[in-house]
Amino acid sequence: MELILKYFPDLTPLQIEQFTKLEALYQDWNLKINVVSRKDIDELYMRHVLHSLAIAKVIQFKEGSSMMDVGTGGGFPGIPLAILFPECEFHLVDSINKKLNVVREVVAGLELQNVKVTHSRVEDIKETYDFIISRAVAAMPTFVHWIKGKVAKTQQNELKNGILYLKGGDLTEELQGYQTAKIYDISNYFEEDFFETKKVVHLPIKWKA
């Protein structure tokens, strides 16, 4: 938890309480349904919570913004971002319901009012969002195909509407066809070795009727 406060010192008492509760909630549920590897559960705040919050170093979502977290798994990056941005709406989507049962319990345990959880393939979601967020669930061309038509037309944030993707390693080849993609090195924001090769990719997506 100290790690979160190190980089986000201005949290409200409620946010501190919610972030603190995360560990016990995940450890409890992880014993029943393995959503996070054993190694990772011991480093939950760095490998999952802080990693998710790297998106908040790239953009401060304006009040009323909407985000869809595709392939949310155990609730990352959606849940940490929903705690940090209580005035924004987050829709967490995954095709594996087993993990979503944990996500629903964590959302209920934290009393998050700004999170919706849906068991679905992303292609079947009909709404549009300011940003589609995700943690490396597929190569970018595949991901872009999945989220076609799901980015809202109206802009309200400093970054253009589109994809915010957490990914590691060399992305040169994968992003070759996307001239407008911008890569942010997470190591510029967080000093821990774990983040050395980790990136946030912002890919603006033009709205198509």
Image (cartoon, rainbow, N blue to C red):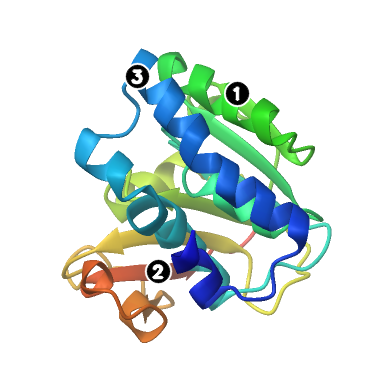
- SS under mark 2: strand
Outermost residue on the bottom side: it is 188
Density class for disc 1 (Cα within 10 Å; few <14, some 14-19, many ≥20) is some
- Residue 67 visible, this angle: no
Question: Label 3, on which residue?
Answer: 31
Residue 43 is left or right of residue 18, and the answer is: left
Residue occupying the point 83% across, 63% down: 63
Q: Earlier in the sequence, mark 2 or mark 1?
A: 1
Q: Residue at x 69, y 67 (%)?
A: 11
Q: Which mark is residue 201?
A: 2
- The residue identified by callout 1 is 104
What is the x, y in percent for residue 18?
A: 65, 46
Q: Earlier in the sequence, mark 1 or mark 3?
A: 3
3D distance between C-alphas at marks 2 and 1: 27 Å
Examine the rendered structure and indicate whether residue 82 appears above or below residue 179: above
Crowding near the residue tagged with mark 2, few <14, some 14–19, many ≥20 C-alpha atoms within 10 Å: many
